[in-house]
Image: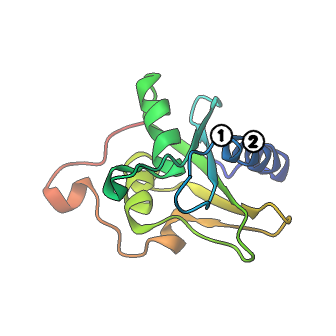
Amino acid sequence: MARPDEATLERLRREAVLARERSYAPYSKFLVGAAVLSRSGKVYRGQNVENASYGLGVCAERTAIFAMVAAGEVAIDAIAVATQAKKIVGPCGACRQVIREFGPDAIVTLVTTSGQKETLSLRELLPRDFGPGDLGFPEPSR
């Protein structure tokens, strides 16, 4: 997988900002959007969805990834995450693990609505990751 160019990452960031506007976050008011670039080049969007039973909410990153899987794809090249935070915010641990399942070499680009951005690899976000090899399985071919 070749690293996506800056124009592609910028398009992905814009998609994540748009996805953020569809968040359902009546409790935290913390809107998050994500956009996944699949290996095929298609972009899948997701947003956080909260629930009065807090543990039943789902993060934007997983919503986007699950939409990708529902469409029949299983490989992530890059993911963008957009928040309105005052500083760059990375995916939670659960989302990092789900990203790893479908994109062990994925590029993660983070953006705030004020325009701050940072791009790094999933391996930088999730060192010493847990994957199929830890269960005795080969890494799936994507």
Q: Amino acid at mark 2?
A: Leu
Residue drawn at x 61%, y 50% is: 79
Q: Residues within 10 Å of mark 2 (few under 14, many from 20)?
A: some
How far from the left and from the top, in percent, is residue 66? 43, 36
**What residue did someone put label 1 on?**
22
Q: Name the image quarter holding residue 77.
A: top right
Residue drawn at x 35%, y 75% is: 128
Report whether 117 appears left or right of 67: right
Q: Are marks 1 and 2 in contact (CB under 8 Å)?
A: yes
How far from the left and from the top, in percent, is residue 81? 64, 56
Depth check, front residue: 139 or 30: 30
For numbered disc 2, what is the local secondary structure? helix
Q: Amino acid at mark 1?
A: Arg
Q: Compared to 53, does 87 lie above or below? A: below
Report whether 5 appears left or right of 59: right
Depth check, mark 1 against mark 2: the one in front is 1
Tell me the quadrant of the picture where the C terminus can be found.
top left
- Give the CA distance from mark 1 to mark 2: 8 Å
Depth check, front residue: 30 or 9: 30
Mark identifier at residue 18 = 2
Q: Name the image quarter holding residue 87.
A: bottom right
Residue drawn at x 37%, y 61% is: 94
Depth check, front residue: 105 or 89: 89
How far from the left and from the top, in percent, is residue 23? 61, 45
